[in-house]
Image (spheres, coloured by chain):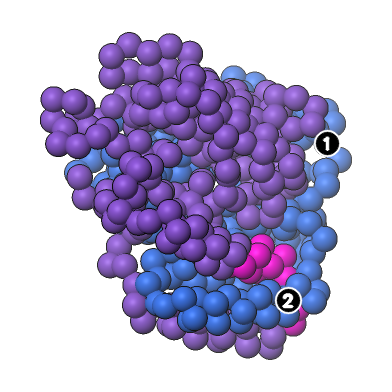
Chain colours: A purple, B blue
């Protein structure tokens, strides 16, 4: 399957790459936040824009043809570093760091600032959906039942304030290639959004059509 | 309601601000894309990171205390420029430019690149949910029935490829403070994801508790 790259990176190289790309990507996240919130004058905006364009050109001198995909090391653990929610190398990702149990139970404590706003001061309802889709998929994968989203239903109990939040997810039940997962987002006062979804193992990843271990692209 | 600011900007100033912040934010979007895809060497990554940090500090010399919120001019049209999906000033937003009819029919043609990846080469399922939440809310607002998301259900018919896409949304029906909206994402081959949702006018925005025109924050 295109985009799933086995590069057999060593543990030392992996730690080295994390130490390099983690802080770099975080620096770009800070720039994204400042881009939304800045009130400096117009000349300064134009001057910063010109410098940003130079930096982009420097980074593009040598770059991947397309998106990041998922890389796998020798242990079979994936590195979805371009992922919109958990991607270490994606400045759009908050990023969530997801704790997982082999039972499928997952949780993550994270912070959402200005880039994730919908109604004033509140998390965009679709951002809650984005995070819960990832969390439910993580639960399915952690429980040994990875899949792509089939259906996803969100119930918004109240507005989710921007700030420190928690997400939780777990497997409700599983039948063959289908896994039902549930989850929620919480602020300090309790649950703000609930989700349930069905995750389906793609045909190309099923045992009968596999020439390697089943990918767990949400790892 | 906090975050809804009436600044009575003139049409000339509005055009001026769009011409300033639109290209600036787009430049940061390009940097975000390059951050994910770059393969330049480590010294160059560290050098670019240091310069990004300097630019962020320059932008932060004068900035909003919190998120952007929504600003209103004298016409009552809102500027949700911090919004995660449509925000002119938000580098996380693709951004979608949404065409609207007074009947509630909405559509948008847009491009999703590397920052929106889930499975390799495919749009993150949660990003489709994010976009459809916005589109259904736009439909409700365009039809004169603005609201916050109550429930949202997504059906994923097949993977959505990264690239050029279209989203469509419309009002299915409306009863009092509740509006049911539907929508879909399409690639060149047809529909990839379907959505339906209920949008509810918040209590503080209902006629009996209003001291001004009803906010239409998705405008």
Report whether residue A62 is seen. Answer: yes
Cα–Cα span, label 2 and label 1: 40 Å
Badge 1 local density, few (<14 within 10 Å), some, or many (20+)? few
Q: Would you name the residue on which mark 2 appears?
A: B57
Closer to the camera, B192 or A149? A149
Closer to the camera, A197 or A201? A201
In the image, the segment drawn in magenta is A27-42
Q: Would you name the residue on which mark 1 appears?
A: B210
How many numbered discs sit on the rendered protein?
2
Badge 2 local density, few (<14 within 10 Å), some, or many (20+)? some
Q: Is residue B58 above or below residue A204?
A: below
Q: Quadrant of residue B163?
A: bottom left
Residue name at image x 54 percent, y 71 percent: B28
Tell which circle, 2 or 1, labels the residue nearer the N-terminal end. Answer: 2
Q: Quadrant of residue A217?
A: top left
Mark 2 vs mark 1: same chain? yes
Residue name at image x 57 percent, y 85 percent: A51
On the picture, is B88 further left or further right than A166? left
Q: Is residue B165 above or below residue A57?
A: above
Report whether residue A69 is seen. Answer: no
* Residue A53, percent from left and from top: 50, 82
| Helix, strand or loop under label 2 | helix
Q: Is residue B211 above or below residue B165?
A: above
* Residue B98, percent from left and from top: 47, 52
């Amino acid at each position: 399957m295109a985009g799933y790259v086995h590069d057999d990176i060593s543990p030392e190289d992996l730690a080295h790459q994390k130490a390099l790309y983690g802080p770099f990507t975080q620096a770009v996240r800070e720039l994204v936040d400042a881009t939304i919130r800045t009130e400096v004058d117009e000349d300064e905006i134009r001057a910063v824009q010109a410098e940003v364009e130079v930096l982009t050109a420097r980074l593009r001198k040598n770059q991947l043809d397309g998106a990041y995909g998922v890389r796998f090391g020798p242990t079979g653990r994936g590195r979805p570093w371009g992922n919109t929610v958990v991607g270490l190398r994606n400045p759009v990702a908050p990023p969530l760091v997801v704790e997982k149990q082999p039972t499928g139970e997952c949780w993550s404590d994270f912070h959402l600032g200005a880039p994730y706003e919908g109604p004033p001061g509140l998390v965009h309802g679709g951002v809650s959906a984005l995070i819960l889709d990832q969390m439910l998929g993580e639960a399915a994968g952690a429980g040994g039942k990875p899949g792509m989203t089939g259906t996803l239903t969100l119930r918004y109990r109240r507005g989710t304030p921007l700030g420190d939040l928690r997400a939780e997810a777990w497997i409700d039940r599983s039948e063959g290639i289908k896994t039902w997962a549930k989850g929620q987002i919480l602020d300090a006062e309790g649950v703000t959004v609930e989700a349930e979804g069905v995750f389906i193992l793609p045909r190309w990843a099923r045992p009968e059509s596999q020439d390697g271990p089943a990918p767990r692209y949400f790892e």
